């Protein structure tokens, strides 16, 4: 197996970056609170909405890193 | 119900007329020979990144979601926000697994997940299990799309007695059936663009205008009862709502792209790269979904639940009336027409894709496999067109003659059923290690266990697992797919010891770009 076939095997270690969002969104006690609130929005809500943006950025990073 | 809201109704009807025309005209868009199944049922696999974005967006974020998620926030509170982490985590899953499925399906002209399983494992019974699961899980989903349509039609004051009450729904469905039959997947793909523009417009206007009317976000959240604002903190000896929430998020996320309509959307893309790009671009919809979920709280804060003019609507549609009532309360009639049309058209797009996906499955993996083994291209496409009509008719009969609760229960069960195809389909794109008979037995065990958990939890998807005095409430889909996987892993070496023959018509290179 040369470098070329290894790379094209489809799996990339970059995918492990996605683990961050799985852990931080599935560990509910971490964010089930009203404080710190932001502009009147409880933490529970703005934290999860913020992750929509961060996760899109993470996927974009992995896309660029694995696109050949 | 109150009088007919003519301004809203006229705008609604005009927009519907426009998408009807668009649905038929779509047959000529990127023209292909619609007598071939991959042209009718997959749009010729020609949709680039942008169209795929609209199509999968139209698939995942359905009218039912727009009504039901805010309704849940209105009625039950914080738990409804599970839709947001769910719609975040689906995209890494899409990114890792599904471009490979696209590649292999493109290479071998597979049109359904059943086709892939048949080719990968050479086992027609395993393919049949995947196919039947897909069709059964999709049917109640189609029926639920009609609920969104029913609610907005009712909210405009259109009503009648007896079967006349269902006439508007019948008209909408005839339109849907006709353009799906004639244009195939091109119809929902083109209509999805209109739908999304309207939905985005509605969501952004609502999220700006309503908080201004209500005096800002701080006031809105202050109006929500504390018990609804956050998840209940679990008591002793139970993980309570925490595992309930987390397993619902993960189980739903794993199940989503196994649904036939999701796979149809993915396979109609023009390249695996378009699928990967979409995994990065589709979260834009998730942001909107979060805004829509908050509208359940807007509805609480606006007090529409106790206003006499909406009492009849809430009586008929329960909490599903929360968002329509909020729109009627906050917007001028002409904008209500646009918002309701967005929901109504938002029902037609996924309903069309779902019926096409179910038709593709029946045609390819039941009819061709077991009844007519050598159909011509034309016979095959014709069969799919007829089946798409039958599937929709079934959904219509379901919603008119049976209580709504049946459709809701069956759709919840559908998630538990479809996730059982995960080992064969999703893991199957990375490994051929699993034995096909082990996969079939794992599927059967997971399905039976899932149905029993669902029944024993009084037709709800949350099952309480008790481990050494600790109660762990969780989504039955996640519990049973783990059981399924354990069975597959234990039985694979057993079956392999009995026979060393491994069938696989796909090669490792077929999965790569």
Image (spheres, coloured by chain):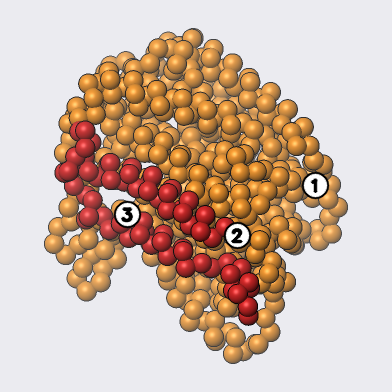
Q: Mark 2 points at which residue?
A: A68
Q: Is mark 1 on a helix, strand or loop?
A: loop
How many C-alpha atoms fall within 10 Å of the one at disc 1: few (<14), some, or many (≥20)? some
Q: Name the residue under label 1.
A: B36
Please tell me in which quadrant of the rendered image residue A5 appears: bottom right
Q: What element carries label 3?
A: helix
Q: What element carries label 2?
A: loop
The answer for which chain carries disc 3 is: A
How many C-alpha atoms fall within 10 Å of the one at disc 3: few (<14), some, or many (≥20)? many
The answer for which chain carries disc 2 is: A
Closer to the N terminus: mark 2 or mark 3?
3
Real-space Cα separation, disc 3 to disc 1, in angstroms = 44 Å
Q: Position of residue B378 (x, y in %)?
A: 84, 47
Horizontal arrangement in the rendering, residue B351 relative to residue B82 (left or right):
right
Real-space Cα separation, disc 1 to disc 2, in angstroms = 33 Å
Q: Mark 3 points at which residue?
A: A25
**Relative depth, front residue between B289 and A57:** A57
Q: Where is residue B116 in the image (x, y as percent from the top left)?
A: 66, 63
Q: Are marks 1 and 2 in contact (CB under 8 Å)?
A: no
Q: Do the residues labelled 2 and 3 touch (CB within 8 Å)?
A: no
State the residue lying farthest toward the left. B236
Residue A68 visible? The answer is yes
Horizontal arrangement in the rendering, residue B329 relative to residue B13 (left or right):
left
B170 lies above or below B391: above
Q: Do the residues at discs 2 and 3 belong to one chain?
A: yes
Say which colour chain B has: orange
């Amino acid at each position: 197996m040369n470098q070329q076939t290894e790379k094209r095997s489809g799996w990339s270690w970059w995918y492990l970056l996605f683990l961050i969002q799985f852990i931080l969104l599935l560990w509910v006690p971490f964010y089930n609170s009203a404080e710190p609130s932001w502009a009147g929005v409880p933490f529970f809500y703005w934290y999860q909405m913020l992750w929509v943006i961060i996760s899109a950025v993470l996927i974009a990073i992995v896309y660029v890193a694995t696109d050949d | 119900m109150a009088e007919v809201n003519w301004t809203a109704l006229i705008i609604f009807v005009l927009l519907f007329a426009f998408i009807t025309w668009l649905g038929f005209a779509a047959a000529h868009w990127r023209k292909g020979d619609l007598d071939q199944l991959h042209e009718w049922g997959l749009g010729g696999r020609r949709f680039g990144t942008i169209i795929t974005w609209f199509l999968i967006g139209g698939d995942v974020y359905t009218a039912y979601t727009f009504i039901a998620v805010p309704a849940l926030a209105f009625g039950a509170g914080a738990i409804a926000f599970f839709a947001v982490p769910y719609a975040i985590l689906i995209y890494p899953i899409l990114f890792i697994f599904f471009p490979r499925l696209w590649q292999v399906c493109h290479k071998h002209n597979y049109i359904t997940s059943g086709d892939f399983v048949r080719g990968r494992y050479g086992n027609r019974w395993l393919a049949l299990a995947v196919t039947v699961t897909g069709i059964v899980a999709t049917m109640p989903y189609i029926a639920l799309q009609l609920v969104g349509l029913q609610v907005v039609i009712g909210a405009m004051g259109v009503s009648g007695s007896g079967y006349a009450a269902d006439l508007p729904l019948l008209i909408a469905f005839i339109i849907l059936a006709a353009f799906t039959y004639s244009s195939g997947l091109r119809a929902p793909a083109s209509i999805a663009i209109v739908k999304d523009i309207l939905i985005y417009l509605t969501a952004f206007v609502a999220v700006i205008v309503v908080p201004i009317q209500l005096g800002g976000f701080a006031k809105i959240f202050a109006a929500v009862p504390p018990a609804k604002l956050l998840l209940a903190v679990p008591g002793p000896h139970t993980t309570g709502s925490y595992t309930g929430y987390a397993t619902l998020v993960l189980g739903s996320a794993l199940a989503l792209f196994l649904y036939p309509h999701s796979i149809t959307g993915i396979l109609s893309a023009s390249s695996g790269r378009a699928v990967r790009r979409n995994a990065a671009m589709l979260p834009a919809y998730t942001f909107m979904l979060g805004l829509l979920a908050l509208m359940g709280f807007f509805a609480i804060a606006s007090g529409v639940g106790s206003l006499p003019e909406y009492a009849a609507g809430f009586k008929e549609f329960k909490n599903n009336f929360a968002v329509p009532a909020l729109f009627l309360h906050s917007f001028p009639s002409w904008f209500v027409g646009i918002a309701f049309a967005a929901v109504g058209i938002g029902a037609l797009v996924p309903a069309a894709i779902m019926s096409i996906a179910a038709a593709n499955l029946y045609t390819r993996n039941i009819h061709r496999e077991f009844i007519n083994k050598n159909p011509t291209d034309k016979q095959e496409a014709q069969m799919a067109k007829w089946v798409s009509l039958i599937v929709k008719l079934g959904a219509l009969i379901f919603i008119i003659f049976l209580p709504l609760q049946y459709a809701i229960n069956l759709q919840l069960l559908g998630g538990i059923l479809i996730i059982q195809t995960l080992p064969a389909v999703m893991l199957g794109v990375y490994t051929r290690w699993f034995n096909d008979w082990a996969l079939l037995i794992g599927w059967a065990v997971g399905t039976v266990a899932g149905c029993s958990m669902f029944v024993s939890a009084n037709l709800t998807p949350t099952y309480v697992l008790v481990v050494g005095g600790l109660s762990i409430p969780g989504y039955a889909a996640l519990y049973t797919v783990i059981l399924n996987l354990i069975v597959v892993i234990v039985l694979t070496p057993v079956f392999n010891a009995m026979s060393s023959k491994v069938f696989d018509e796909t090669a490792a290179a077929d999965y790569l770009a």
